[in-house]
Image (spheres, helix red, strand yellow):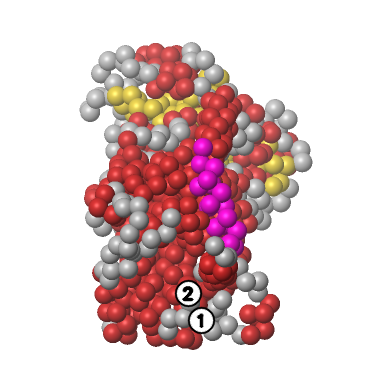
């Protein structure tokens, strides 16, 4: 592996113009493709095989008129006053006149009036799903009632969902990353080149992703997740190779040779770090939930592009930069190795020796501390997001709060029971029985009379719970309803709605999690066994990850669900975590945790293979890589942290959890617990049964074969007569 990448690095260095031209051409072509082929993203959560999805599919077939997006306009009179039909009629008429609206229900005819007469709900039905409703129709919907004097009019419902916008908040993360690079390298050229390389990789990956949106349905969060990870790993991978290149230059190697060796050694670590991330993300496909599979594959694609860019375009950029990659005082073409080249013992070496002395106390304090942070995770609740957790002041949140104020929170989370029978008689009888049983269910406020399709074979029951869509009482009511109606004969009854969807997602994810962990963790352990030729090092890496993910869940639950210090990250209303956050977080964090494991321990393995004793190898690995791993973790944290500033609660929670997870994993687990364990294990850390050692292919990640080959070539050159 190291030899192959060494040749690739030298080739890219020599053919810098061609390599750069190929990537720029690819970026241009994909950019044109994205501009011409890009389709809309979707906020639909499709879950084949679940009861709630079956109910939605039945609605699409049997009630096509209700298959489009819905909107809810909330109208309120001033305090102490009541609404009358004459005051509300112009608002209903205006909503009915919007292109794409099939119906707007008069609240006084359908009974959507509060008990005190101050509030009404106008139900608006569109002819297309929310992701297909044009922006001009959504804008017209939001303007309905703007001229209604003396009335408060708020707009909510499915149609208000939109694409997550990417803006200045993410740029702040990139700006912080640039500052960290400048401080780390002490060179604007090195920092700018590393950042430019990563940005080109992200641009190629995102352009390719958007080019596919015309044929693949993406959720609105998928491109944001892909951007988030592409930026983070792209900068980190370029950082590691550039750092190793600078080290070789400082040791006196010529630029081309330094680029080849950096690509061969650090590049090997980049390849396997990237592969672990790709495995973790692509493994989300085993869950069987389409939108989650697409999210994982989209992010995996940007990570794969980041690896390719780091291995090919970066050496080309290094060729353009030459010795300008070094700080100004070190840019001499020839001469003895600089202080950097002699591996001046900085903080990393000091920290490595300190860990050796305090390894047991460090392990005890670290494990107990992370265990304490994990405690809030015991109370973790998950659900699909609703407008109740949207940013205060947003249109969806205003409509949610006004509806809750006038009618109760349950009107924001209506449930729908779909009754399918063989004929009209059996359907009607089953619908009556279901209505009676549902009305008796604790936590249910009311059930609307059955609505039948033209054939009378399908009935729709609208159910209003007493509590909001993410309340425990509503979740209990969903379970009770399903248990009660299961015994009704003569028809199939399926329950759907926001709460039912959330429950089904959670259950499906819980069922898939063991298989996912077995696949991802199992493959990654085998991969790390190939990289490190060890049994204990991969197991230690996996156990360290468990500490990371447990503490991350605990901190995220404490802030986003329980509300502790929520204001610091802009969380207006605490609530359950989004249903797919746990499995998504496990997948991404596992891949990133293995990144730092590979980068940190690969140097320890490299020195051990080249003759250092285990303790010295551990200290050397920390000494050479602590600064770079610290910079990489700060960069990744800043990139993820930029997404915490977004208003979208899903992206905010994902960005926060990833930022916290990286901090915990990099600075506590990998920089403290890992060297402490390596020091305790000593030579045993690198033990591998001989039969297994013979069976595993030697990938030469540490570059031992490459060093022998280069040494042999050097000897041959000295033997050539002059």
Q: Nearer the viewer, residue 530 or 18?
A: 18
Rendered position, 530 above or below 202: below
Label 1 or label 2, whichever comes before in sequence order: 2
Quadrant housing residue 607: bottom left
Asked if residue 651 lies left or right of residue 56, the reply is left
Q: Per the image, is 370 magenta?
A: no
Q: Does the CB distance between marks 1 and 2 fall below 8 Å?
A: yes
Query: Is residue 590 shown to the viewer in this render?
Result: no
What's the distance in space between the residues labelled 1 and 2, CA to CA? 8 Å
Label 2: which secondary element: helix
Quadrant location, the C terminus: bottom right
Label 1: which secondary element: helix
Crowd class of label 2 (few under 14; some 14 to 19; many from 20; radius 10 Å): many
Q: Residue at x 55, y 58 (%)?
A: 6
Quadrant housing residue 80: top left
Q: Per the image, is 5 magenta?
A: yes
Q: Residue at x 37, y 74 (%)?
A: 620
Rendered position, 566 above or below 373: above
- Residue 139 drawn at (x, y percent): 42, 20
Residue position marked by numbered label 1 in the rendering: 686
Magenta residues: mostly which secondary structure? helix
Q: Which mark is residue 605?
A: 2
Given this view, does label 1 or label 2 mark the residue nearer the observer?
Answer: 2
Question: What stretch of residues is rendered in magenta?
Answer: 1-17
- Residue 602 drawn at (x, y percent): 47, 69
Quadrant location, the N terminus: bottom right
């Amino acid at each position: 592996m190291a030899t192959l990448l060494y040749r690739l690095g030298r080739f890219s260095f020599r053919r810098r113009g061609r390599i750069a031209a190929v990537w720029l051409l690819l970026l241009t072509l994909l950019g044109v493709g994205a501009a011409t082929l890009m389709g809309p993203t979707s906020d639909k959560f499709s879950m084949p095989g679940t009861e709630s999805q079956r109910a939605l599919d039945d609605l699409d077939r049997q009630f096509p008129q209700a298959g489009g997006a819905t909107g809810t306009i909330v109208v309120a009179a001033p305090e102490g006053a009541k609404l009358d039909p004459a005051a509300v009629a112009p608002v209903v008429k205006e909503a009915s006149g919007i292109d794409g609206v099939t119906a707007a229900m008069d609240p006084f005819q359908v009974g959507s009036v509060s008990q005190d007469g101050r509030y009404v709900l106008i139900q608006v039905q569109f002819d297309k799903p929310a992701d297909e409703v044009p922006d001009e129709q959504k804008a017209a919907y939001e303007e309905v009632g703007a001229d209604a004097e003396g009335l408060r009019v708020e707009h909510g419902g499915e149609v208000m969902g939109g694409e997550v916008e990417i803006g200045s908040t993410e740029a702040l993360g990139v700006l912080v990353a640039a500052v960290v690079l400048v401080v780390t390298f002490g060179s604007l050229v090195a920092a700018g080149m590393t950042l430019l390389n990563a940005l080109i990789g992200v641009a190629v990956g995102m352009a390719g992703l958007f080019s596919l949106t015309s044929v693949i349905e993406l959720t609105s969060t998928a491109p944001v997740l892909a951007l988030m990870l592409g930026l983070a790993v792209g900068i980190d991978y370029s950082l590691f190779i550039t750092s190793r290149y600078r080290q070789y230059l400082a040791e006196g190697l010529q630029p081309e040779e330094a680029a080849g060796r950096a690509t061969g050694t650090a590049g090997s670590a980049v390849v396997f770090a990237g592969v672990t991330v790709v495995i973790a993300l692509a493994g989300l496909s085993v869950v069987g939930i389409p939108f989650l599979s697409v999210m994982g594959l989209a992010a995996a694609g940007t990570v794969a592009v980041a690896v390719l860019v780091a291995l090919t375009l970066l050496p080309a950029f290094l060729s353009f930069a030459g010795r300008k990659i070094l700080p100004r005082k070190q840019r001499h073409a020839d001469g003895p190795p600089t202080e950097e080249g002699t591996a001046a013992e900085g903080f990393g070496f000091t920290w490595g020796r300190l860990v050796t002395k305090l390894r047991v106390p460090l392990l005890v304090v670290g494990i107990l501390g992370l265990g304490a942070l994990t405690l809030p995770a015991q109370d973790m609740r998950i659900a699909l997001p609703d407008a109740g957790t949207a940013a205060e002041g947003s249109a969806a949140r205003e409509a949610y709060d006004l509806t809750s104020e006038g009618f109760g929170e349950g009107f924001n989370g209506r449930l729908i029971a779909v009754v399918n029978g063989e004929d009209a008689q059996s359907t009607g009888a089953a619908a009556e029985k279901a209505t009676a049983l549902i009305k008796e269910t604790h936590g249910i406020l009311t059930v609307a009379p059955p609505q039948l399709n033209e054939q009378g074979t399908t009935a729709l029951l609208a159910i209003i719970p007493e509590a909001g869509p993410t309340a425990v009482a509503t979740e209990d009511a969903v379970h009770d309803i399903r248990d009660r109606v299961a015994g009704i004969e003569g028809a199939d009854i399926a329950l759907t709605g926001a709460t039912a969807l959330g429950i089904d997602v959670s259950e499906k994810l819980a069922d898939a999690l063991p298989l996912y962990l077995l696949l991802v963790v199992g493959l990654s352990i085998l991969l790390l066994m190939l990289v490190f030729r060890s049994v204990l090092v991969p197991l230690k890496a996996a156990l360290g990850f468990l500490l990371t993910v447990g503490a991350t869940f605990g901190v995220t639950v404490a802030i986003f669900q329980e509300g502790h210090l929520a204001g610091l990250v802009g969380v207006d209303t605490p609530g359950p975590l989004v249903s797919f956050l746990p499995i998504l977080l496990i997948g991404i964090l596992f891949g990133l945790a293995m990144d730092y494991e590979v980068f940190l321990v690969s140097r320890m393995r490299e020195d051990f293979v080249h003759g250092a004793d285990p303790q010295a190898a551990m200290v050397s690995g920390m000494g050479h890589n602590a600064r770079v791993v610290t910079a990489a973790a700060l960069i990744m944290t800043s990139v993820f942290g930029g997404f915490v500033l977004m208003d979208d609660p899903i992206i905010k929670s994902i960005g926060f959890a990833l930022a916290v997870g990286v901090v915990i994993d990099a600075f506590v687990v990998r920089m403290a617990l890992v060297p402490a364990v390596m020091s305790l294990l000593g030579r045993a850390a690198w033990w591998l049964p001989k039969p297994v050692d013979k069976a595993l292919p030697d990938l030469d990640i540490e570059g031992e074969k490459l060093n022998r080959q280069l040494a042999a070539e050097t000897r041959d050159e000295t033997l050539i007569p002059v």
